[in-house]
């Protein structure tokens, strides 16, 4: 008994035409430890936008009901060569109700429950999901649980990673985001020092309202001095950046090196021995990352992704992290949305031009049955 | 009984005036495990040039015998704020004869011997050096031993570091340098795969003459394809770069990712899980390092310095590396020089304008008693 429903797909052909459209799809019966979830809410995350929009010219796209077709500029198209011709589902995460389950024990235990899940095709009316990755939501609504995985586990992952590396403070370059707010609350709960960078004065106020102590505004003329002061006070030589492009990582390394240099008794042309560590975990800005020669050789910059990190911590730590998310879903790990749209509404020009800006605090929630 | 001799010093004042000059200095008697070395030969390495010349306007400097005074542009001057007002010795390494020794056993054992040493003030007629860091040269000349430390230990360090990280191949972005030639010979001896990047076709020929198998010319139109092919054939997802500025690191990561993507069975918007690792160990180009968004998140870039690396390997490994250098000083670890100059000659306009270019294969050797 196959289940029929609407699902969103994104396809980029070799000629540079991006087609994003909704199709009627037949979902197979779940087997083993799979479950079939009737999806009720799914966020549009920055990581989803990479394949939904990427560098496409969405201003001049052709919009028809349930579909848009856009040109991809040559450079962006060449950079996406590995996906040419592939019809990709989209949507990392979401929440819904388990309406069918494979014969496996873990799957059967979820039958009829509302769960958060990580199917990789969450922008859909139905999904096949791995029971081991589902989080039962109890009495929580689908909207409360829609973003229960990516942001909460990433924010917790930063703190876990920092503790594992012996750090007592973290720098986060986009403090006012949903994830940044979660990180602010987690660091308070765990006694981990935190430096938040934001771009606007009202974001400074908002984060201080959450109890953040070190909030630095990159729009201020004395940004680098503010940042240096915050690094000095917290000892945050370890940071996470979702922007990628431009100079945020560079400025962070420079502030760290300034603090380290203050503590050196002797000049070294090679810079300080203080290890400075930054991670890029997103590409909100796809322009190049700029690293200057101003902070010696004692630094390391890495890409950071949730999945390999979770694989590295093991099942027990991951279970503890998931339990913490579930226990604090409407407090520490609460997400806010700007608006709710259906699958069809998310493919209108008005919606695409708005959510592809990825403005802080303006995330879209897709409710495919509304 | 103090020893009097000439020594070179470099001073940058807060106003941006760089003064490099030779002074008569009184060298103290060595104590403990110090030795006093009468220096016979010292190379001018890129790392020395950072404090000898840096970004100074040496075209328009004032040259007088044994001295030049140059203006430092505002940005370079600001970046060097931590050395303002400090009178710095220069010259990482060199070779000479031990003419006095402290009472320590290691120091006494070197009395009268010709040694390579790492005094940090090698551009001088005399140096105080740490006996533990001296390498007795036996019958080798001072010229043969002048560069026995920085390049040989760095090249050996790359291979040690790669082995420690489980790698079987290395990428080196400046293959034709003295260090690159050493690395080529070491990798052959150790069965370590090596991809050399060079800039000219005669450098391709020269390295192939040394037995190198994978030499890629960055001046060729199909450079990225050549590089991708060499990475595919060697499995070099691990590389070292002395340039720093520009796109060499970026291109290296891109070639590595292309090879990794060929081996993926499924498309991922996050790039491959193949860990790509690059180290910047110099700044031949002080312009910014450019990192594009074309190779996902499975990469790490670090600064790399010899001293912290040697500290991390421990005394035994370091002893083995030093022994290997001494045993192969005129073969594997041989250095070439473009010319020999005295301390006075190295401060003439003609010399400064030439060696500050740091052209491959055109290193200067300073012979302070010639």
Image (cartoon, coloured by chain):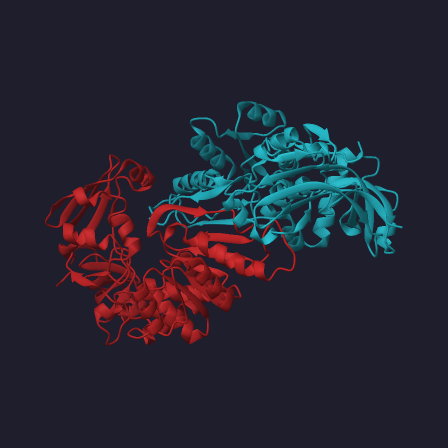
Chain colours: A red, B cyan
Placement of B27 over or under A146, stated as above or below: above
Q: Residue at x 51, y 30 (%)?
A: B216
- The quarter of the image holding the C terminus of chain B is top right
Q: Is residue B96 visible?
A: yes
Q: Residue at x 31, y 75 (%)?
A: A331
State how many labels appear: 0
Most foreground residue, A287 or B206: A287
Most foreground residue, A367 or B17: B17
Q: Is residue A25 visible?
A: no
- Please state if A134 lies on the left or on the right of B333 as rendered: left
- Please state if A62 lies on the left or on the right of A92 as rendered: left
- Please state if B331 lies on the left or on the right of B237 as rendered: right
Placement of B116 over or under A200, stated as above or below: above
Placement of A261 over or under B293, stated as above or below: below
Residue A309 pos. (x, y %): 43, 59
Residue A20 pos. (x, y %): 19, 47
Residue B72 pos. (x, y %): 56, 42
């Amino acid at each position: 008994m196959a289940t029929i429903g609407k699902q969103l797909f994104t396809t980029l052909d070799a000629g540079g035409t991006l087609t994003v459209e909704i199709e009627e799809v037949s979902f197979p019966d779940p087997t083993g430890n799979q479950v079939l979830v009737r999806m009720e809410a799914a966020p549009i995350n920055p990581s989803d936008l990479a394949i939904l929009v990427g560098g496409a010219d969405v201003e001049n796209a052709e919009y028809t009901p349930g579909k848009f077709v856009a040109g991809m500029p040559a450079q962006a198209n060449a950079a996406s060569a590995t996906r040419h011709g592939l019809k990709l589902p989209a949507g990392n995460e979401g929440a819904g109700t388990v309406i069918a389950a494979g014969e496996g024990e873990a799957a059967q235990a979820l039958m009829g429950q509302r769960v958060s899940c990580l199917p990789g095709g969450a922008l859909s009316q139905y999904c096949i999901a791995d029971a081991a990755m589902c989080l039962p939501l109890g009495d929580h609504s689908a909207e409360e649980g829609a973003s229960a995985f990516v942001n909460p586990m990433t924010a917790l992952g930063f703190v876990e990673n920092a503790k594992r590396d012996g750090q007592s403070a973290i720098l986060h370059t986009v403090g006012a985001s949903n994830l940044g707010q979660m990180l602010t609350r987690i660091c308070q709960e765990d006694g981990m020092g935190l430096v938040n960078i934001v771009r606007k004065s009202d974001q400074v106020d908002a984060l201080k309202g959450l109890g953040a102590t070190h909030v630095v505004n990159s729009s201020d003329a004395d940004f680098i001095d503010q940042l240096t002061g915050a690094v000095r006070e917290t000892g945050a030589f370890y940071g996470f950046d979702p922007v990628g492009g431009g100079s945020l990582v560079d400025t962070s390394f420079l502030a760290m090196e300034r603090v380290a240099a203050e503590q050196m008794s002797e000049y070294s042309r090679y810079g300080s021995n203080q290890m400075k560590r930054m991670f890029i975990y997103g590409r909100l800005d796809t322009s190049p990352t700029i690293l200057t020669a101003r902070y010696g050789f004692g630094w390391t910059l890495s890409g950071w992704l949730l999945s390999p990190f979770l694989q590295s911590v093991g099942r027990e730590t991951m279970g503890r992290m998931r339990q913490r998310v579930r226990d604090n879903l409407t407090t520490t790990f609460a997400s806010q949305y700007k608006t709710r749209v259906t699958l069809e509404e998310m493919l209108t020009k008005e919606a695409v031009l708005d959510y592809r800006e990825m403005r802080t605090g303006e995330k879209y929630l897709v409710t495919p049955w509304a």
